[in-house]
Image: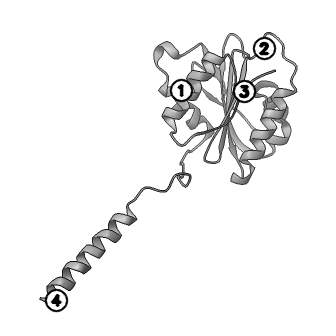
Amino acid sequence: MKKIVAFVLMAAMLLSLTACAKQPAEEGTQTVEIASALELLNNVWAQYADDEKFAAAGGDASEENMTMDAPGKFGVEDKEMLDIMLALPASAGEKIDDAASLMHMMNANTFTGGAYHAVSAEDVSAIVDEIVNNIGGRQWMCGFPEELLVMTVGDYVISAFGAKDLLDVFEANTLKAYDMMQVAYREPIA
């Protein structure tokens, strides 16, 4: 009888250890596997319903990266162009090794979004701060964006500025694509 009780207890202990090993990670410890900044924005764009989409263009001015109606890869070599087009300051540009963009085709101040891969996960908060500071000190032409939104997911930073209603949809669709996404900053641009 003792052997049967010992066997049942041992089986119960093994089952409980197996169950504990299969528990999901605690909140805040999830890891995200994203292959590129372009994949990230493509996954977000795929969440958009047809009536939420706008006339969009992506990428940079190079022939191989320019896209219509979808996000595109943005080269990280030209730090000045990252600042001019996406409002990513050169100081933050030194901390990234991959980028992608999505812009409103009629007016970039209506919506401009970028995704950036941080070379080091420790640089994510510094990149967020540098984007926020750069947007606050900009001179705007051809309209004035209403709000700035900066989010993080894993070692990626996602920034967008433009009309509030377009940012609302972008934030919701980013959360659909990446439920562990965190809003780091969302404020009107003064």
Q: Quadrant of residue 181?
A: top right
Q: Position of residue 93 (x, y in %)?
A: 79, 40
Secondary structure at numbered mark 2: loop
Q: Which one is earlier in the sequence, the residue at label 4 or at label 2?
A: 4
Residue contact between numbered discs 4 and 2, judged by CB atoms under 8 Å: no
Res. 144 mark:
2
Say which residue label 4 marks. 3
Report the side of 165 relative to 173 (left or right): right
Identify the amino acid type marked 1.
Trp
Q: Position of residue 114 (x, y in %)?
A: 68, 31
Say which residue label 3 marks. 187
Q: Position of residue 44 (x, y in %)?
A: 54, 30
- Residue positioned most to the left: 1
Above or below for 23 versus 185: below
Nearest to viewer (mark 2 / mark 1): 2
Secondary structure at numbered mark 3: strand
Q: Mark 1 and mark 4: span between their CA atoms?
A: 60 Å
Identify the amino acid type marked 3.
Glu
Count neighbours of disc 1 (C-alpha within 10 A) and say few if under 14, some if 14 to 19, many if 20 or more. Answer: many
Count neighbours of disc 4 (C-alpha within 10 A) and say few if under 14, some if 14 to 19, many if 20 or more. Answer: few
